[in-house]
Amino acid sequence: MTHFDSETLDRNQWDAMLLSIPQLSARDKRNFEAVLHVLLSGMAWEDFPEEEFGMSFRTPWNRYRHWQQTGLWPLMLQAYCSTLPEAMQHSWKARMFQAEEHRLRRSGSRKRAALEKA
């Protein structure tokens, strides 16, 4: 697998997320990983590596928009972050903020923030 290890959830992480967010289903895992890949890399959705993930960029993009519109996205990020070792949580949040700032600079302020600063 060529994308970042921090974007690939192990079974225990995803199970913890499923338990904390009942609206998620097992099939959402790969979409969540794909969204993290796009957001953390700062790439445009159109540059999404479709062959690597085995799906069109539209699939995770549509799920991401749905999760944002329903208010699940912040809950998902919080649930994911809570599965990381405590020492990694701060660096992961910082990485997410840096990637979001990069996307905002490149794409303009019309993009919604992935994480709210605490």
Image (cartoon, helix red, strand yellow):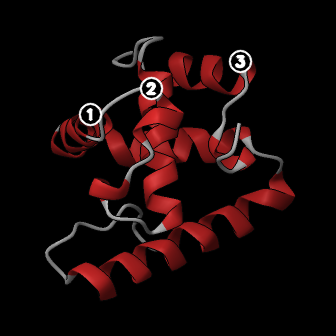
Q: Nearer the viewer, residue 57 or 74?
A: 57
Q: Earlier in the sequence, mark 1 or mark 2?
A: 2
Q: Give the side of residue 82 with respect to residue 52, left or right.
A: right
Lower sequence index among marks 3 and 2: 3
Where does residue 37 sit, x and y in percent of width and height?
Answer: 51, 50
Do the CB atoms of the residues marked 3 and 2 lie less than 8 Å apart? Answer: no
Residue that carries the numbered disc 3 in the rendered image? 11
Question: What residue lies at 66% left-to-right and 36% top-to-bottom?
Answer: 8
Q: What residue is rendered at 63% in x and 16% in y?
A: 15
Residue at mark 1 to residue at mark 2: CA–CA distance: 15 Å
Q: Are marks 1 and 2 in contact (CB under 8 Å)?
A: no
Q: Tag on residue 54?
A: 2
Name of the residue lying farthest toward the bottom: 105
Q: Residue 19, percent across and down?
A: 55, 16
Q: Which residue is mark 1?
A: 63
Which amino acid is tagged 2? Gly
Asked which secondary structure carries label 2, the reply is: loop
Q: Residue at x 62, y 74 (%)?
A: 94
